[in-house]
Image (cartoon, rainbow, N blue to C red):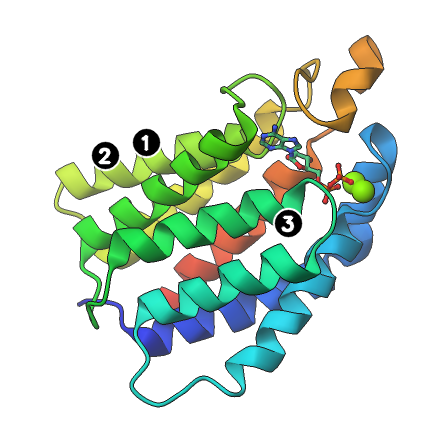
Amino acid sequence: MNLNVTWAEAWIREGARVIAEHRAELNTLDRAIGDGDHGENMDRGFQAVVLKLDALPAGSTPGDVLKLVATTLISTVGGASGPLFGTAFLKAAVAVGTVGDLDAAAVAALIAAARDGIVLRGKAVVGDKTMIDAWTPAVDAAAAARNADASVVTLLQQAADAAAAGAVSTEPLVAHKGRASYLGERAIGHRDPGAESTTLLLRAAAETAAR
Ligand code: ADP
Ligand code: MG
Ligand code: MG
């Protein structure tokens, strides 16, 4: 089974729904080690995306959906996460190109390109206590699933599981990027909000693929 534009649209709508559902929780995580607006930022951006999806032209591809997400997040989300997630979706769009159906290799490439876009923009490495701590394990899990000839659904589930574990792994860390880096050791014991929202988005990708 491959994933098409119907999946891409369902993924982003479900992502918007879970971001809205977890808005307060993401704000709370960001209040502990940042400025308390991560849920608000992500929810504002994804609600704007949903409005634009309502007007998605017929014949659009998965890449068109990803590009729409990118441009909307860049223009509507203030803060660090707007340009970071915006660049992620932009690079993901370029990676999938204009094809209508994404196989496991294409989905693995999508996730890797998204991560690479965030690194290009924010220069974080694993262990810096950022969203990269969720994205990079997801990229690795997707590549491993791809090499094991897993289905796209299994690949996405394993990527989401790896992201979730990666988000938890940020808790004992001191931050080296973003606002949390100003806190030094006071950031220890708190989960990175961007790693958590990354997990929500990848979980939404897996759940909608399994429908
Ligand atoms: P702001 O910090 O501007 O208020 P948000 O609260 O929306 O923006 O986003 C904060 C999240 O952005 C952090 O939890 C972290 O995951 C992510 N982040 C910040 N700086 C970087 C960076 N340089 N690279 C990767 N992710 C980063
Ligand atoms: Mg913030
Ligand atoms: Mg802010």
- Classify 153 as above or below 2: above
Residue occupied by mark 3: 82
For badge 1, the amino acid type reads: Asp
Image spot of residue 185 (x, y percent): 80, 9
77 and 22: which is toward the camera: 77
Tell me the quadrant of the picture where the N terminus can be found: bottom left
Q: Nearer the viewer, mark 2 or mark 3?
A: 3
Q: Which residue is mark 2?
A: 144
Q: Is residue 25 left or right of residue 159?
A: right
Indicate the secondary structure of the residue bearing disc 1: helix
Picture coordinates of residue 95, whole percent (x, y): 27, 51
**Residue 17 seen from this side:** no
Residue to which mark 1 is pinned? 140
Q: Is residue 140 visible?
A: yes
Mark 2 vs 3, N-terminal side: 3
Tell me the kind of residue under disc 3. Gly
Mark 2 residue element? helix
Taking the spot 33% from the left edge, 80% from the top edge, the residue there is 60
In the image, residue 86 lies at what x, y percent?
54, 51
Q: What is the spatial separation of the Cα atoms under label 1 and label 3, in whole angstroms?
A: 24 Å
Label 2 is placed on what type of residue? Ala
Quadrant holding ligand 2?
Answer: top right
Residue 69, above or below 58 = above
Asked whether the residues under the numbered discs 1 and 2 touch, taking CB atoms below 8 Å apart as contact, a structural biologist would say: yes
Closer to the observer: label 1 or label 3?
3
Q: Quadrant of the C terminus?
A: bottom left
